[in-house]
Amino acid sequence: MTGGPSTKREAGSRLFPDKPIGTANSEMPFDHVIVVMMENHSFDNLLGALPLTRADIVGLTFDDAGVTTNSNPDVSDPPSEVAAFALPNTKQAKHVTQSWAATHEQINGGAMDGFVRSVSGAHEPMGYYTPEVLPFAYSLANTFTVANSWFCSVPGPTYPNRRFLLAGTAWGLTVTNIEQSVLHSSPPNGTIFDLLSHHHIDWRDYFTDVPSSLVIPSAFVKHLRHHHTLEKFFHDCEAGSLPAVSFVDPGQGVLRSIATSVSSQSSIVRESLDIIGVNVAALPQSDTQEDPDDMYYGEAWAHKIVEAVLRSPNWERTVLIYTYDEHGGYYDHVAPPAAIPPDDIPPDLPVGQTGSYDMYGPRVPAVVVSPYAKRGGVSDLTYDHTSILATIEHKWNLPALTRRDANALTIMDFLDPATAALLDPPAITAPPQTGPSGPVTHAG
C-alpha cells in the first residue's frame, strides 16, 4: 500500500476562500445533516448478502447455489479454510477483536486473510447477516444509496475512529482506553463542534443514554448546552425544528462504560453528566450493535430514528448519514487503501507494534438517506468518516480541521441534486420481534 493519495488542501483551508465562512452552498440539496454512527460491523458482515440480489454491490462472493466462496485460514498446521457463513439470528459472537494489533494482522498487507488467526482460530469473524435476520439494514440499503467503499478512518478500535469523526484526527490514540482519553489533550485544531459553535451554525448532539462525544471529554464539557436527550430529537423532528447539524447517539455499548469510568476519574465530567440528566446507574439496553449485544435492539432503535426523520417537516431538506465506527473484527474482503495522514502526530504505539495513520481501516456499512438519494443506488467512490466532516465543511464553507478532512470526498455522489425521487417518504422495514430478526437476548 504505497503511493498514497496526494494532499491538495491543508488544514484551515476552505472550499470557497473568497466567500465568508458560514455561507451555505446552494448546490448541496439539504439544510440539515444528521449523523448516526453505530458500532463494530464490517460491510461484509452486515450487508454481505446484498450481491445475491444486486450486481452493483461489492459484497461477499456466492456460487450458483448461493454458497459463499470467501474464506480465511485458521491456525492449524497445515491451515484449513474457514468459509464465510450465514448467521441464523441476532445473537452476537464474543470471539472478535478490533484492537490496533489485531486489525493490522487481519488486513495482513492487503491480503485480508488474518481475521480467524487474530482470534486464535475462532470462526466468529467469518459470520454474516442475511435480510431475514437484519431486515431494517437491508431495507435501508436497498431503498437509499449505499457505499461500496466506505472505510473506517484508522485500522483500529472505537475511540480513535470516533475521534476522526469529531476532529479529523486521533492525535496519537490507538486504543479504546478511558484513562488515556481523560488525560489526553484536546485535538490540535479543535472539533467539528468547535467550528460549528464558533461560526454560529446551530447543532445538537442527541443521546440515548450517554453522549458519544465523551471520547473527547473536553468537547463534551465545553458544549454542554448542545447536548440533549433523545426525546428532544423526536420533538424536533415532529416540530420541524431540527438544527443544521445533528449527531444522534444510540444507547452505548463499549462507550457505555465511559460514563462510569470517566465520571469516577473526573469530577467535571461527573457534574456535567448530572446537568444533562444522565443516570449512570440506570443505563438501558445497548442499541449500538456492539458485540455481544443483541442486534435486534440496534435495528429497532435505528428504525425509529429513520422513521422520525422521514415523517418530519424537515425531510425535504435533510440528509442522514448512517454508518459504523469500525469493523469490530468481522471479516471484510476489500483491502483498505492508503490514506492521507491527518497531521504530523504519530500514533502512540506499544513497543513492538507498527503502523501509522496513513491507511484506512476495513470497510464499514454506510447508507445516505435523503429525498435526493439515488433510489436503490450505490456510490463506488472512496470515503471514510472524515467525509462527514467534509460534507459539513463544504455545506457551510468552514475551514478544514486536518489534512484528512480537507481532502476527503463529500457525500454528494450519493445524491442526485436535480431529482428528489424519494420526497414521498418510502417504507422502511422494521425488524419483527419474532422469527430470526427477533431478539435472542432480552433486555433486562
Image: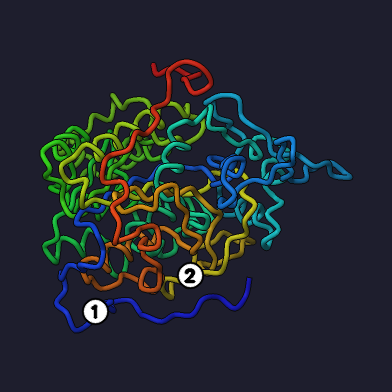
Numbered badge on residue 392: none
With 252 as the anchor, is 217 left or right in this view? left
State whether residue 422 is above or below residue 244: above
- Kindly report the distance in space between the C-alpha atoms of the residues bearing marks 2 and 1: 30 Å
Numbered badge on residue 346: 2
Label 1, residues with CA under 10 Å away: few <14, some 14-19, many ≥20: some
Cβ–Cβ under 8 Å for marks 2 and 1: no
Element on which disc 1 rests: loop
Residue at 26% x, 77% y is 14
Element on which disc 2 rests: loop
Q: Quadrant of residue 409?
A: bottom left
Type of amino acid under label 2:
Pro
State whether residue 360 is above or below residue 206: below
Type of amino acid under label 1:
Phe
State whether residue 307 is above or below residue 141: above
- Residue under pointer 1: 16
Q: Quadrant of residue 398?
A: bottom left
| Residue 422 pos. (x, y %) | 31, 46
Residue at 28% x, 43% y is 248
| Residue 97 can be seen in this image | no
The C terminus appears in which quarter of the rendering? top left
With 264 as the anchor, is 351 left or right in this view? right
Residue at 34% x, 59% y is 416
Residue at 51% x, 60% y is 380
Circle nearer the viewer, 2 or 1: 1
| Residue 109 can be seen in this image | yes
With 261 as the anchor, is 437 left or right in this view? right
